[in-house]
Amino acid sequence: MTSPPREPAGDGPEERDSGLARERTALSWTRTAISFAALGGVVLKQNVITGLIILAIAPVVWQLGRVSRGPAPGAADQLPGRSVVGATRLFVIAVSIVAVALLCLVVAILGRSAPGALR
Amino acid sequence: MSWSQRLAALLPGAVERDAGGTEPDPRFTFANERTFLAWSRTALALVVAGLGIVQLLPPFPGVPAGRHLLGVPLIALGAVLAIVAYTEWVRNQRALRRGEPLPRSVMPLVLAATITGMAIISGIVLLVSALR
């Protein structure tokens, strides 16, 4: 089965320039990295080592989003072998979240709590 | 297709080797990637919420395990959501490459069912706690 022919570009800014999609995706990667950092900050208060491990993931995530900020596919300055989206990058994110959730489970079950902090 | 074959097909190497179809419009590829990232942030938010409930809420009088009852499932759901988000991304990307209709996502149903379940459990824990 062949893919349907691409529709002609419309008048909207998104149709004229896929760079906006690239920019939104890059911002989405940044927000995800910030989410990791925020979670690391929360865990840091309960368990320093676990918190630091999660905090260290944040710059890695930000760096993984680098490909989304790269040159357009087919551009002359595109690095050879680099695809727009790599399954490995997203797989790393999914595995990181599972690992972080497991660490947080251990902290939640075994760690010292500060009951009443939200009283 | 057996479960082991299905799992193997989700590994990044298998996904990148699967060159069936043609490269889709980059806008669709980016949109698929953003959807995955949005679900990832939702998963992280669930983990934070679960940890906050267990570590920061005051104990429920009469329900000693109440905080764990509410927090631990949320953290576990965060892990599940991350895995399902990745599998959905793989399925969507394959459909985009082959020009097929996008498969229906189970994620909203899973999230809605879990939030409803957690709301019911929270209500029961609060009720039991208030009656003691």
Image: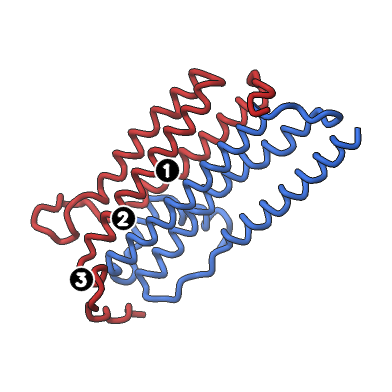
Chain colours: A red, B blue
- Residue shown at the point (86%, 36%) measured from the top left: B130
* Of labels 1 and 2, the one closer to you: 2
Mark 1 or 2 closer to N-term? 2
**Chain containing the residue with disc 3:** A
Residue of label 3: A16
Q: Residues within 10 Å of mark 1 (few under 14, many from 20)?
A: many
> B89 or B39, which is in the foreground?
B39
Q: Position of residue B47 (x, y in %)?
A: 57, 38
Type of amino acid at the residue the image marks with label 1: Ile
Tell me what residue is drawn at x 54 percent, y 53 percent.
Answer: B84
Using the image, tell me which numbered label, if any, was put on residue B86.
none
Q: CA distance from mark 1 to mark 2?
A: 18 Å
User: Residue B108: x and y, percent?
Assistant: 58, 60
Q: Is residue B129 left or right of residue A83?
A: right
Residues tagged 1 and 2 counted as in contact (Cβ below 8 A): no
Amino acid tagged 2: Arg
State the image quarter where residue B21 is shown: bottom left
Is B27 displayed left or right of B129 in the figure?
left
**Residue where numbered disc 1 is placed:** A93
For mark 3, give the secondary structure: helix
The answer to whether dots 2 and 3 both sit on one chain is yes
Which residue lies under the disc numbered 2? A24
The C terminus of chain B, quarter of image = top right
